[in-house]
Amino acid sequence: MSPATLDGLGYGDLMRPTPSNPDVAAHGALDQAVLARASTATAMFSDLASNTHDGDGITRASYGDGEQYAHACMARYARAIGLEIASDAAGNTYATLPGSERSLAPIIIGSHLDSVAQGGNFDGAAGVVSGLVAAAALRDAGIQLRRDVRVMGIRAEESAWFGVSYIGSRSALGTLPDGALEHARRSDSGLTLSEHMLQCGADPSAISSTAPYLPPASLHAYLEVHIEQGPVLEASAIAVGIVTGIRANRRLPRARCVGEYSHCGGVPRSHRRDAAIAVARLVSQLDDWWDACEERDQDFAFTVGKLGTDPSWHAMTKIAGEVNFSLDMRSLDANLLDATEARLHSCVAALSTKYGVSFELGETTSAAPGVLAQGIRAGLQESAASLAIPTIEIASGASHDAAAFAAAGVPTAMLFIRNANGSHNPHEAMEITDFIDATRILALWLVNAE
Amino acid sequence: MSPATLDGLGYGDLMRPTPSNPDVAAHGALDQAVLARASTATAMFSDLASNTHDGDGITRASYGDGEQYAHACMARYARAIGLEIASDAAGNTYATLPGSERSLAPIIIGSHLDSVAQGGNFDGAAGVVSGLVAAAALRDAGIQLRRDVRVMGIRAEESAWFGVSYIGSRSALGTLPDGALEHARRSDSGLTLSEHMLQCGADPSAISSTAPYLPPASLHAYLEVHIEQGPVLEASAIAVGIVTGIRANRRLPRARCVGEYSHCGGVPRSHRRDAAIAVARLVSQLDDWWDACEERDQDFAFTVGKLGTDPSWHAMTKIAGEVNFSLDMRSLDANLLDATEARLHSCVAALSTKYGVSFELGETTSAAPGVLAQGIRAGLQESAASLAIPTIEIASGASHDAAAFAAAGVPTAMLFIRNANGSHNPHEAMEITDFIDATRILALWLVNAE
């Protein structure tokens, strides 16, 4: 790093005990600069919230209007900070703070700018804002790193829209599954991923035909700051978590049980083909499986987020001839997911026979567990300690773009920010002071990561 | 009956062994007249089907366009037959064949003209057409009965629309539950029953403020012909069933389980409030209860016809914060329904605690079992035997307006017509020859019921 002219800047009581390291003064100036940029963060959060509010919560559909706005907003703030703006064929936005040796492998600080429908303002966006604030603070403090730091606003992380996760990051890394561009369709519009990309000015044909924009081997590290989507930090009264790993998942975005519509009173039980009872039994059996996993101390979770008879066909007095549902299964242990999938198939076979229904499970998508880099985790721990910010280690039950980078072989790590009320809902509540603490750790790590 | 001039009419081989009864010739002429009216039936069925088809099946919403058309169609055919047309404050249509002693209590031959959404053409309408054909045949054969025979086209039997059953028949009988006119809302439009009645030219205020149009004590009998909504007659290779009783029901048209939307990976199991799992457990527990009822040989059935997360809130990666569902429970034994309701409430209490959700079960409607008149059943049996039409006795698992008449104290009976593929779907399949057999029994019973 360039030592710059930091001697005159006061350091305050933010760091104690005062380290004897020679870089202390520069680090102190950087930390002050992060603190001074809190207003940039609140302004950008409030800009995003007021322009992507849907009446109930925040909606930034993948390759939709809200996400599009968020990318434009990111570019506007990044330009004001003095960063270089670029975008790739998938429409990901990059804001680069140039290093002194630009041929070195860059560090990516990224997260996604889309949200689920009626979601919250911080899920995803906080990581981008944190990267921009850290870059701004480095500028403000007059610190130039050797490597480029590229803040990446990632497209289409939320699988709710296309049934495929990590679309933006995997497009950039060259690991998007074959066929997704043409076959994945957005749940609200029915248009393909490729069609939506074109509407947003991206170039889907270039994603499959040209070399990846971010060849994994060309990257020094990937770091993602994200709100915690559960209550662990809140319950521990700790602002920042250092993530130990990211759960693998198996997902059935569009599963279906087909029975037969018929009159609910007139048909004897032996003749009924009731899709509602069959699906209820399946969900109960998966919940039994979860009980068994817990008894064996195996990490597991499953969710039926979408479930429903067809409103244009169903009636109180009709046996349900069709139930559509989604299924999301997660574990830190990919082998347990293999066993769960086998269990799912055996349950489905037995229920089909017993209830005279058929299950059409549809496509199964999967994501490998995200193995996070021990070296970066230790570096983050060291930065937090030197800033006297208490942290805990925490596993990520939720999926993140970080898992795509880790799976591609990029040294990857994550920080979680305390957040009340969970996420994927309008009630998520992140304190800006917690956000700034995570960003202070990030900024100091960037300097030390050199 | 008036013997009329029937001697010249041939009787054919439709009735053997030839009875020695002096009315044989008149009965034979009547039977021939019913057979000759098969074309009226097929014309009216085809008129109804082509004018109330929705693209997939038949939709005649209660107090909606399709039902409105069916009542106009009924009046048109009834006028052509020479019957007197009238309607009551609820918009039920009456087509009367005058008797020779009009002060005697009339016989009502009725069924409903509405259907579920994407339903079939015969469910309900067959009973009205059967009544019209029987009345036409009596006219054609020159037979005048002593009593009026009133064919009643009944409004709004299907509870799918307003969550309330037997609206037309109970309005006529003066037994519609308090508040239904103002509080029941149609599932598609959200408008109240009263508002929809007004749109159809009915007079809802008169229903509650004036004496019933059909005081139960003023009726001689109520008879309803209806397609069977199950496979029993089809499996028995029998065209007509004589109904022994109608199941009581308890219904929860709009039940709801409220949990909390949150991220499906981030939230530990102990903090989840998953409405999808809670409802799946409830449905499974009711299915266990059904198993137990079967083991004790108790008549029971339950159906969750409508089930669903909220499409504007749900996502594959969100824990379900809300599941809406309907519940229909039936038994010939009202005491078993009391026990089932108690069981439902204890399951709901335990699941609320276990899964951290709350259940809002909403209104429970109930219908008493329909106890059918032994005397009419015997009369129908006798008519069938004299026509050499084989019948079986059969309980009605489905609900019918007949249950409202029976509950009001009117001597009531029902005939079922064989029907393949169940009902409440577009695939119901009634053969016109089976329909005519049931109508032959009805017509002869009318003569004998004098």
Image (tube, coloured by chain):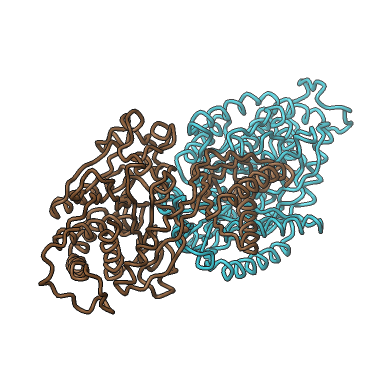
Chain colours: A brown, B cyan
Q: Nearer the viewer, residue B217 or A184?
A: A184
Residue A351 vertical position relative to residue B192 in the rendered view, above or below:
above
Residue B323 vertical position relative to residue B34 in the rendered view, above or below:
below
The percent position of residue A32, horizontal first and vertical second, equals 18, 70
Give the left or right position of residue A48, taking residue B244 as reference.
left
How many numbered callouts? 0
Name the residue rendered at 53%, 28% in the picture: B47
Q: In the picture, residue A45 is in which quadrant? A: bottom left
Give the left or right position of residue A267, taking residue A102 as reference.
right
Q: Nearer the viewer, residue A341 or B259?
A: A341
Q: Nearer the viewer, residue B448 or A37?
A: A37
Q: Quadrant of the N terminus of chain A?
A: bottom left
Q: In the picture, residue A126 is in which quadrant? A: bottom left
Give the left or right position of residue A36, taking residue B253 as reference.
left
Name the residue rendered at 80%, 27% in the picture: B25
The percent position of residue B364, horizontal first and vertical second, equals 57, 62
The percent position of residue B61, horizontal first and vertical second, equals 49, 43
Give the left or right position of residue A13, taking residue B95 as reference.
left
The percent position of residue A151, horizontal first and vertical second, equals 25, 51
Regarding residue A38, the answer to whether it shows in the image is no
Q: Quadrant of the C terminus of chain A?
A: bottom left
Regarding residue A122, the answer to whether it shows in the image is yes
